[in-house]
Image (cartoon, helix red, strand yellow):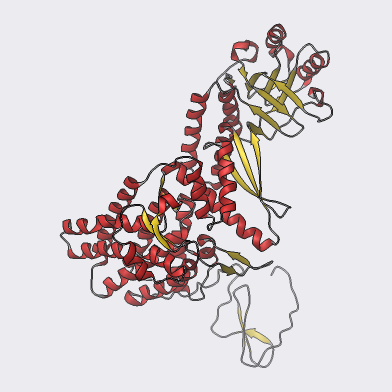
Amino acid sequence: FGERRKLLFVVEKGAELRMGCGETWAFVGGPVLPSAGVRRSRVGTPPMCLAKKVTFGDEARKSLLTGIDAVANAVKITLGPKGRNVVLETAFGAPQVVNDGVTIAKDISLADPAENTGSLLLQEVASKTDLKAGDGTTTSTLLCQALINQGLKAVAAGRNPIALKRGMDKAVKAVIDEINKCAKPTSGIDDIRSVATISAGNDEAMGDIIAAAYERIGETGSTSVEESQSLNDEVEFTEGMELDRGYISPYFIKDQERQICDMKQPRVFVTDRKISNVSDIVKLLEQMVKIKQPLFMVCDDVTGEALSTLVVNKMRGVLDVCAIKTPGFGERRKGYLQDIAILTGAKYIAEDLGMSLDTVTVDDLGLAERVVSAKEACTIIATGQHQEEIKERIAQIRQDVETTDSEFDRQKGEERIARLGGGIARIKVGAATETELKDKKLRYEDALNATRAAIEAGIVPGGGSTLLFCSRVIPPLMETLEDEDEKIGAEIVLKSLEAPIMQIAENAGREGEVILEKVRDLEFGMGYNARTDKVENLLESGVIDPTKVATWSLENAESVASLVLTTECL
């Protein structure tokens, strides 16, 4: 407490007061005194730990199952073209009306701690699938629920959960291998439109906008989703490499009306050094005056007499020059400079490598088709002469993105890929209300993630038909298994793979078992289209899913389900 204070307590006779400093006082009808038998502890004593409730066996698994069912039942009603929405209460603002599986799963929190643990396990399934594939969170949640329900019945019947897990692992591996064999690459913009439309909840307008964006920027470009002030959705395109740095001095401006410096076919000088002495670059400037080409400089900074010399030569018309500071911050600055050097074919003059500025010649400079510099932005449009080097650089950055655990690093890596790839498409989402806007943004993000996954790993027929078709590899596998419990584990996977198509049918108002029997023995590509309520060729009708969505949904679902089955204590 540190100082003496007078405190007034109004308490009943015989009651106790527990102080924040760890002291306990008992009221006996007179003055407040320390209670008998209680030691007064000094300030800073940590509070007592809360007691843990430990449950075992069937009781533990039943509690987990209750939590899992609570999440899965809320999520699975959104599956398919006729799936419904879920309203989520928010602490502030209007409620959210969403159709996105992972958003719904993350918002659910149960009062019972044991049941809430089960809900958290299912949230992990949805989150991992969203992270790896970008879509398919509802399917993975539904598969996990089916696997756990089937598995717990086997455990209750006396089957060994460890052997069940081994059988499930083998069956899932066989199915995933079969899915990868059946996958086909995306062929043209129509496949991209179909994937985007399906993932956006069968919204054709969203599918058309995403297809238009990819048609313009290509597979290496980047797309982002932003909020618009209007009621309609629109797409804005930025071609070339866009940097968040503008000209160092306003004297570099060529177009006074637009306040920009527009240079055509300039030579590009890239370094991470600060230029303050004109003697460092005078040799290079003399050569540039001879060849009479514009010079675009990217460096840490230009100050002092070096900046004065550039401005004087610019204003006298001796040399067309413009300089910008290095984009980015910290270690990322070197990455950006290397990207610019590779894009333009320039030699990166790095201080770490001991390179000197006074030895730079015209041969060390790159070439750009066009450079437009504004006060706070700059766009470099490449000549297209260094495509092989750019592809190698993109592959290297993509590998770094896949291995990083930081979401921020992942976003910056994708931005760099887009800048090197030659374009960025910004989808601006408009809506009448805030609730509708959030729902549309989630749909666009799901559709974009699914489209990227389809471009990377190909596509398969959707509507749950691929999982059902590829489950045919399980019966032959069961014949090779000697352990009876492992066979039951494989059979659990076989039955669970029927769940998605049955749920899609039920959400469309049809009997799941009836639809399942109709499509069970059809050839690959054929399946139930809930939108038209027909059994047809899903590849031809545009009902397709990214291969990564199908494989990751199954793999993540089985991973958590097998752990729940082997749980004996909670």
Is 300 situated left or right of 354 in this image? right
Residue at x 77% of width, y 32% of height = 375
Q: For the view shown, which residue lies furthest in the left direction?
A: 482
The picture places residue 486, in percent across and down from the top left corner, at 22, 62
Q: Is residue 470 left or right of residue 511?
A: left
Q: Position of residue 258 (x, y in %)?
A: 81, 31
**Residue 96: x %, y % from top left:** 62, 65
Is residue 33 toward the left or the right of residue 502 in the image?
A: right
358 over 570 or under it: above or below: above
Q: Residue at x 71, y 8 (%)?
A: 286
Q: Which of 40 and 350 is in front in this view?
A: 350
| Quadrant where the image shows the C terminus | bottom left
* Quadrant assignment for the N terminus: bottom right
Q: In this view, does 540 lie above or below 139?
A: above
Query: Which of the 4 image quarters holds residue 424?
Result: top right
State which quadrant residue 420 falls in. Answer: top right
Please say whether residue 481 is visible from this viewpoint: yes
Q: Is residue 124 visible?
A: no
Quarter location, residue 267: top right
Q: Is residue 251 left or right of 236 when viewed as pictured? A: right
- The residue at 59%/68% (across/down) is 88
How many numbered discs?
A: 0
Q: Nearer the viewer, residue 179 or 153?
A: 179
- Residue 531 lies, in percent from the top left, at 48, 61
